[in-house]
Image (cartoon, grey):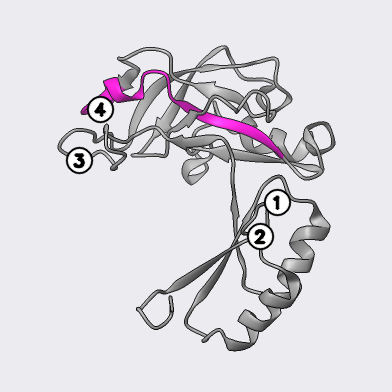
Amino acid sequence: MAVETGADAIGMIFAPSVRRITESAAKHIAEELPPFITPVGVFVNPSRDEIARARAIFPDLVIQLQLPIANALVDSSGRALPRTRFYVPGSILSMRVDTTAALAQGLRPITDFYYDNAEAFRLLPAAESRGVKRVVWIDNPTPLRSGWAWGQRYLNGVTEVLQAPVGRGMLVLYGADPYFRSQPHGTFKLLFNALLYRNTLGD
């Protein structure tokens, strides 16, 4: 039905749910799926084995993790803010850093970040119980240090870097790019620490 109506992707729930797909049904779909359709799997805190089994059926499977986070840069209807309301190209913003986190070792409590219309996350109520932790965030309505920030007030309270346990590992999400063009020396450590402390974070 989805293919016939022009869909370019098909989603399947592998997480515990009344709509969870069975392995036999997944294999049947894989046999019938046209090459131009992208298979998407929905998981909740999956193990490596769960992902491996799904990938054995769908080698090109796109993984969708149901994490308790959301896009912070949206209007009241959930639509992305248009450029007429929010536009921050290539500017320097001041952000708060949790320096107790292994991921942020060596950074200052208040650090300047290069920001170029980057992602911004909002933690949902279930985030804490799911082990999602903010590492870098913006805590004021005027974080601009240099450049241009139209609608910068929308960034007040957003999370820019977070970590979330997934299976036996730790997923790190970056909004602002800490290593843009290998230039921002003040934030490099957010990338290097993810590699250096991989065992501490969760392999």
**In which quadrant is the C terminus drawn?**
top right
Q: Nearer the viewer, residue 156 or 176?
A: 156
| Type of amino acid under label 1 | Pro
Q: Position of residue 191 (x, y in %)?
A: 63, 38
Q: Secondary structure at mark 1?
A: loop
Q: Is residue 107 left or right of residue 9?
A: right
Distance CA(mark 3)–CA(mark 4): 11 Å
What residue is pinned by disc 2?
20
| Type of amino acid under label 4 | Ala
What residue is pinned by disc 4?
149
Q: Secondary structure at mark 3?
A: loop
Q: Is residue 150 left or right of residue 32?
A: left
What residue is pinned by disc 3?
83
Mark closer to the observer (1, 4): 1
- Is residue 163 shown above or below 7? above
- Is residue 155 shown above or below 31? above
Contact? badges 2 and 1 (CB < 8 Å): yes
| Type of amino acid under label 3 | Arg
Contact? badges 1 and 4 (CB < 8 Å): no
Q: Earlier in the sequence, mark 3 or mark 2?
A: 2
Q: Position of residue 103 (x, y in %)?
A: 69, 28
